[in-house]
Every structure is written in structure tokens, then in C-alpha cells.
Image: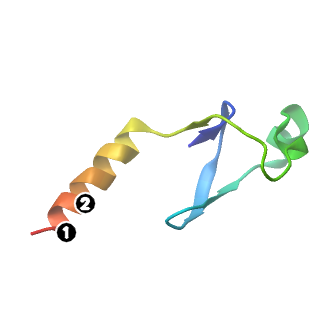
Amino acid sequence: MAVDGVSLTVVAVTETTFEGDLIPHSQAVTTLSKLQVGTLVNVETDILGKYLARQLALEGSH
């Protein structure tokens, strides 16, 4: 997953939120540490993750 072009490791997910891990170097060289709650950001997901989620949902519906 990426937020504003910065790749994050997702560490927790709920139906409406996610929590990502940001290494100190990324905090130092990006603007992510300056974001405030409610700031709009661009969120990108891995296309393989979408296919995996779809496949798991299909398998669970049987």
C-alpha cells in the first residue's frame, strides 16, 4: 500500500481503517509525518492484493 507515493507496510486492517508502519527514514524525507487527521491523501493499493482478496472471498462463499 502507498500513501501519497510512500510505500507502507500494512500492520492492521479493519472494515474502515488501516494502520501502516513508517520507517524513520521515510518520516525524515517525506511529508507524511506532517499530515493531520482529516487531510486528504492519495491511497494506492497493490493490484495483486485486490486479486487475492477477491479469490479468498470467492472461496469463502462456497
Give the amino acid type for the residue marked by disc 1 in the picture.
Gly
Give the amino acid type for the residue marked by disc 2 in the picture.
Leu
- Residue 56's tag is 2
Q: Is residue 52 above or below residue 41?
A: below
Whether pointer 2 and pointer 1 mark residues with C-beta atoms closer than 8 Å, the reply is yes
Q: Is residue 5 above or below residue 60?
A: above
Q: Where does the image place residue 13, in percent across and percent down from the top left?
A: 54, 64
Q: Is residue 36 above or below residue 48?
A: below
Residue 47: which quarter of the image? top left
Element carrying mark 2: helix
Q: Is residue 20 above or below residue 40?
A: below
- Residue 60's tag is 1
Looking at the image, how many numbered discs can be counted on the residues? 2
Tell me the residue at 39%/46% (across/down). Answer: 49
Q: Where does the image place residue 8, in percent across and percent down from the top left?
A: 64, 46
Left or right of 18 on screen, residue 21: right
CA–CA distance in space, label 2 to label 1: 6 Å
